[in-house]
Amino acid sequence: MFMCENHRPRLALSAYPAFLSAALLASLSPLWAQVPRVAPPIASQFAASTTAAAASPPANSPTHEQLADALAVHQRYQAAIHEYMQAPPTAAVWNKMGIAYQMMFNLKDATHCYKESLKLNSHNASVLNNLATIDDSLKQYRQAEKLYHKALKVDPQSALVLKNLGTNLLSQRKYSQGWDAYKQALAIDPQIFQDRTSPQVQNPTTVQERGAMNYYMAMGCVRTGHTDCALQYLRMALDEGFTNPKKIASDIAFESLRDNPEFQQLLASQSKQSKPKSQ
């Protein structure tokens, strides 16, 4: 069954140099789209520096960290790790090395790197978020929840952390709290659920949990005016047995869809499928 990736926890990549954001989205989206999200490291410095380098080659060779960043963009994570290990062990380098390990599903070494990063800078919301995504992947939801809250104390306006916290709470069937976190994330960044710039990490869930996430994702999409997206999530929530057409029709959150022909057709077709066959 198709599982929409947007509600999976996401890694925070903001520690990467500014040069990677556009390139990361273009070259890494197929992989990152499969995997709860880490916070983005990568932004615009390198884009500017590479443009300048094309015009006039730099006098100095790139640093190990710069080489590693470039390798990570092209998904050459093992080679990137090798370069990171030769770079000065800053908090940012440890975080980026952790992301590389995590993208290779080496959670043990990724955890070690994130903890080393936090030893050097314990007030980094991105690293706390990334460490929490590992706990989410291991279904250690309470520990992950604590880390998300800790990250929010550092950066209360992080839509990414709030979205990840919402997904975490829904996984614990704390539906009201999860939806509240989603609403806070949407208030800060209405496009947070359409974000493709930060990698996701595998977060296995039960069918019931996926149904709940998809239902509340539909609410989020309605709230931001993304009708097609809302209908897609509602269809998955119905298929996963989390809700039924009668409950959807009576939910005030979907009031704006009542006159939408596709919405009506979705409920009608699902109602028909759910009726017991005559003997």
Image (cartoon, grey):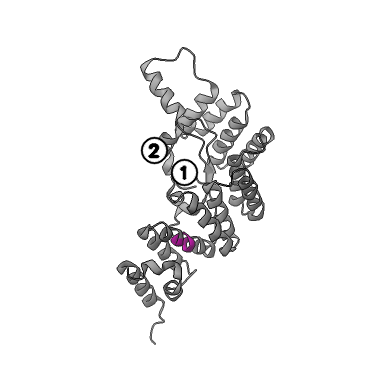
Quarter in which the C terminus is drawn:
bottom left
- Can you give x and y, in whole percent of width and height, for residue 227 in the image? 36, 60
Q: Quadrant of the N terminus?
A: bottom left
Which residue is at a point 64% across and 46% down the rendered structure image? 153
Residue 132, position as x, y percentages in the image: 61, 47
- Mark number for residue 26? 2
User: From what the image shows, is residue 173 above or below residue 247?
Assistant: above
Q: Which tag, 2 or 1, sits closer to the chain's start?
A: 2
Q: Position of residue 242 (x, y in %)?
A: 49, 68
In the picture as drawn, the residue positioned furthest to the top comes out as 59
- Nearer-the-camera pick, 155 or 208: 155
- Residue identified by numbered label 1: 32
Residue 90 is situated, as x and y percent measured from the top left of the image, at 62, 28
* Mark 2 vs mark 1, CA separation in Å: 11 Å
Extent of the magenta region: 214-219
Overall secondary structure of the magenta stretch? helix
Residue 154 among those drawn in magenta: no
Horizontal arrangement in the rendering, residue 277 relative to residue 153 (left or right): left
Whether label 2 touches label 1, CB < 8 Å: no
At horizontal 51% and vertical 25% (from top left) the residue drawn is: 66
Amino acid type shown at disc 2: Ala
Q: Which mark is residue 47?
A: none
Give the residue displayed 53% in from the left and 20% down from the top: 63
Q: Secondary structure at mark 2?
A: helix
Furthest-left residue in view? 261
Quarter of the image for residue 206 reads bottom right
Is 273 displayed left or right of 150 in the figure?
left
